[in-house]
Amino acid sequence: MRVTSVITHWPRRYVVVALTFLGCIIAYTDRVNISVAAIAMKDHFGWSQTQKGFVLANLVNPYAADTTRCDVVDRSAGGRAHRYGRW
C-alpha cells in the first residue's frame, strides 16, 4: 500500500494538522541549527559579538513582516479572506 493512497483517505483536517506540525518541527530545527552555526560563522567571518547579534536578530524580520501583512489583510478584508487565502 502506497503512502499517497493512505493520505488521500484521511480527512482534510488531519492532513492540515500533520503538515502544520511538520512545518513547525522544520522551523524550530532551522532556528536551532542557525543558532549553533552562528558561532562558527562568527569565527569564520571575523564578526564581533554585536555583529553576530545583528545577523541573528535579522532572522526575525521575515516573521514580523508576515505578521504585519496578515494583520493588514485581516483588518481590511476580514477573517474569511484570510482563511481562504484571498489576498
Image (spheres, grey):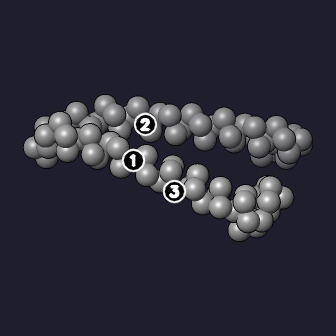
Q: Which residue corresponds to mark 2?
A: 31
As displayed, is residue 83 above or below residue 6? below
Of the numbered discs in the image, which one, if any, rests on residue 59? 1
The residue positioned 57% from the left and 34% from the top of the image is 25
First along the sequence among labels 2 and 1: 2
Q: Quadrant of the N terminus?
A: top right
Say what amino acid the circle numbered 1 marks. Answer: Leu
Mark 2 touches mark 1? (CB < 8 Å)? yes
Say what amino acid the circle numbered 2 marks. Answer: Arg
The residue positioned 84% from the left and 41% from the top of the image is 13
Q: Which residue corresponds to mark 3?
A: 65
First along the sequence among labels 2 and 3: 2
Please identify, in this view, whether the residue under mark 2 or under mark 1 is nearer the observer: 1
- Left or right: where does residue 14 sit relative to residue 21? right
Residue 86 appearing in the image:
yes
Where is residue 26 drawn, in percent x and y?
A: 53, 38
